[in-house]
Amino acid sequence: MSVLFDNAVSIWAMVLIVLLPVLIVAGGELEERLRQRRSPLTEPVATMRTWVLGLATLWVLVVMVLGVSASNVFVRVLATAICIALVIACLQLLSFVTNRAEQRAELPGERGIPALLLLLPRLLVFLFAGWVIFAGIWNVDLTGLFAALGVTSLVVSLALQPTLSSLASGLLLLGDRPFSPGDWISFDDTEGRVVDLGWRTSRIQDRNGDIHVVPNATLSTTNLVNYAQPNELHRVVVPVQVAYSNPPTSAKEMLLAAARATEGVLESPPPNIRVKQIDDPLMGYEAHMWIDDYAIAPRVFSDFGSLVWYQSNRMDVPLPSPAYDLYHHDPIQEAADAEVGFEERKERIRRSPQLRDLSDGDLGRLASAARAVRFSRGERMVPQEDGSTDTFVLFEGAARIVDPLRTIRFVELSAGDVFAVLGRSSESGLSPEVVAMTDCEVVVISAEAAGAVISRNPALNEALNRLEVSRMRRLDPTEPVSVGPPGSLNGGSGAAEQSAANAAVEETPDDG
């Protein structure tokens, strides 16, 4: 038996009689199963079983068993046929892999593979097969061919330097992947969607539907913006000018309403409005809106502009009128008209339930020492450490007196309420804050004028001090409170709050 296996011819005969038939039968079984499943791998398996194994069996029989020289023409033709069959099987297998890659690229969130990368494996298979056939089987000396190709390559590279530069740039772009087909990009003065990335050039379709064929060398050396990476989110910024006479809070609300109503604008991240210019007679704003498809950016820009006009009319927030501003705008007269006069201040003070019963003379004294002031929503009207002792009459809007340490405790203020700095908390040493909940307009009365008028009206002084006690206890029921000195004007709201204050004072002994 050992002598049998020491004989090379006997070994190859065993391979021919046992191994190759087993491989052919197993290949046939595998092919049938794949065909039943309609698998794309059926073709390469069939090629391997029918042609590669069949020709390999014949080659073993002729060369290894019968001992025919490998330099025989028939043997060389047979070996060449085996290589060609292997090349066909490899190409079929690569086609299966390529189709799978293309199908995967169509899934959401996946990126396509450039055609150039899919072509390179096929090129390598052909080059390797050619080298094996000519140099290995037919013993062709390729040294001269390589030398000629080297000289030819040098000449061609000098003659086609721009083209080869684009080819090299294409390979670098394929490796770096700064963009993929379907991405929106912009560079220099061009903006569009990438249609294809080739060996030498890339094709980009602009918004007019025109195709720009751009050399890859240009794309690799320019500053390029990709609007699709790392995600599809894009911010659309639209500058808008609004008439200076509009309060910023009202203008922002109008612009936000237009932004939220614009089709395609995302709720998260939410749109926001920024003030960019303060210059009478115009106020400059910027609307920032987020979208998830850069292709709709021009439409969003246009739709938002249209909605601003309609929202401006509905919400009574005028837009600037250049013709009117140019020929009829009188800043001095407008400033004089906008200023709240003495009689108007007097009437605003009279609307307060606590001050309406003052004599006409006392109301005049308060009005002569008062000024009209406007506050934005969220603004502190009487900050903690302001040091102000002035008195405020809320003419329009809503506000809250808030404990700086316990923000869940507050006292509501509405039109007609009177307020000023309350006493400091013994725990924090801070005075409560008064914060505007909406845009507010107040009348600010100087401390001297308020003190002089209240000192002549003891009943008013007592009522206002009771309201101060009521407010402090509503902010913190455990806080000991003492009423302010005569002449302080820290009173509160109308008849309902007056009754609450009286009840609080009757139930709780006054500490001061």
Image: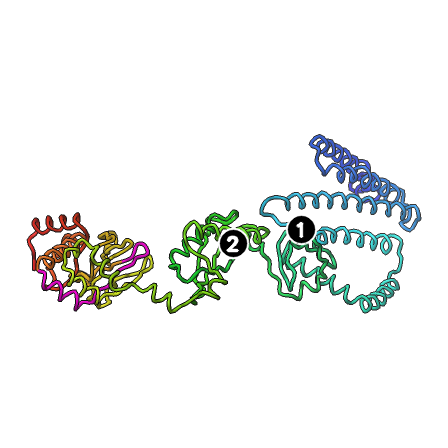
Relative placement, left or right, of 364 versus 222 is: left
Q: Residue furthest right?
A: 73
Q: Earlier in the sequence, mark 2 or mark 1?
A: 1
Name the one closer to the observer, 16 or 184: 184
Q: Which residues are magenta?
A: 435-457
Instruction: Please name the amino acid that badge 2 sits on.
Output: Gly
- Residue 71 in percent (x, y) is at 91, 51
How many marks can you see?
2
Q: Are marks 2 and 1 in contact (CB under 8 Å)?
A: no
Q: Which residue is mark 2?
A: 305
Residue at coordinates 85% horizontally, 54% vertically from top-left? 136
Query: Closer to the observer: label 2 or label 1?
Result: 2
Q: Which residue is mark 1?
A: 113
Q: Is residue 471 above or below residue 150?
A: above
Name the one closer to the observer, 464 or 318: 318
- Residue 64 in percent (x, y) is at 86, 44
